Image (tube, rainbow, N blue to C red):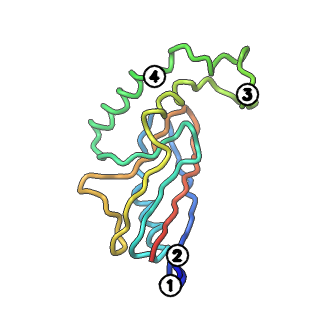
Amino acid sequence: MKATDVGFTVQISTLSVKSSTAPEFVDITNLVKDVIRNSRVRNGIVVVYSKHTTAAIKIQENEPLLLEDMTNLLERLAPMDEVYGHNDFNVRTVHMNEDECPNGHSHCQHLILSTSESIPLVDGYLALGQYQAIFMVELDRDKSEREILVQVMGV
């Protein structure tokens, strides 16, 4: 039996997620749920993926004081005002853009986070725990919009 015989579906959608500061935890759970609803997949897996090296995807609790604690942790681990070779535009020669900004701290913060999360889909619902939410974590300043891919796979 082939996957197509049982109605296997793969759907990929792109979300445009806005941020206003960094670090910032943007709850995208409802946006992901909308993609799932439109896919009509009932059971499978959902992959949420950031196309950026300075914007992460994390599952965490959406509690204001905890979000503040996590923001403070990121800033302590890789402070913006630290010296980063990536920010030395007189020496750096690769992946340079006209509007390049010094964001070495953002890349270093991303190291402890992740580019994607995979969540089981059961009976049309994300199998998230009671307090779990899906976040796009903005690590770079003033990026305003990010592309997040949501891939829904299943039956």
First of labels 1, 4 by sequence position: 1
Location of residue 87 in the rendering, given as x and y in whole percent from the top left corner: 63, 20
Residue tagged 1: 1
What amino acid type should be assigned to the residue bearing mark 1? Met
First of labels 2, 3 by sequence position: 2
Judge the density around disc 4: few (<14), some (14-19), many (≥20) Cα neighbours within 10 Å: some
Residue tagged 4: 78
Q: What separation in Å lies between label 1 and label 3 (alpha carbons)? A: 49 Å
- Could you tell me which residue is drawn at 37 percent across and 67 percent down? 121
Work out whether 21 lies above or below 122: above
Q: What separation in Å lies between label 2 and label 3 (alpha carbons)? A: 39 Å
Q: What separation in Å lies between label 2 and label 4 (alpha carbons)? A: 41 Å
Residue tagged 3: 94
* Location of residue 130 by image quarter: bottom left
Judge the density around disc 3: few (<14), some (14-19), many (≥20) Cα neighbours within 10 Å: few
Furthest residue to the front?
A: 1
- In the picture, the disc for residue 9 is 2
Q: What separation in Å lies between label 2 and label 1 (alpha carbons)? A: 15 Å
What amino acid type should be assigned to the residue bearing mark 2? Thr
Marks 1 and 3: which is nearer the front?
1
Judge the density around disc 1: few (<14), some (14-19), many (≥20) Cα neighbours within 10 Å: few
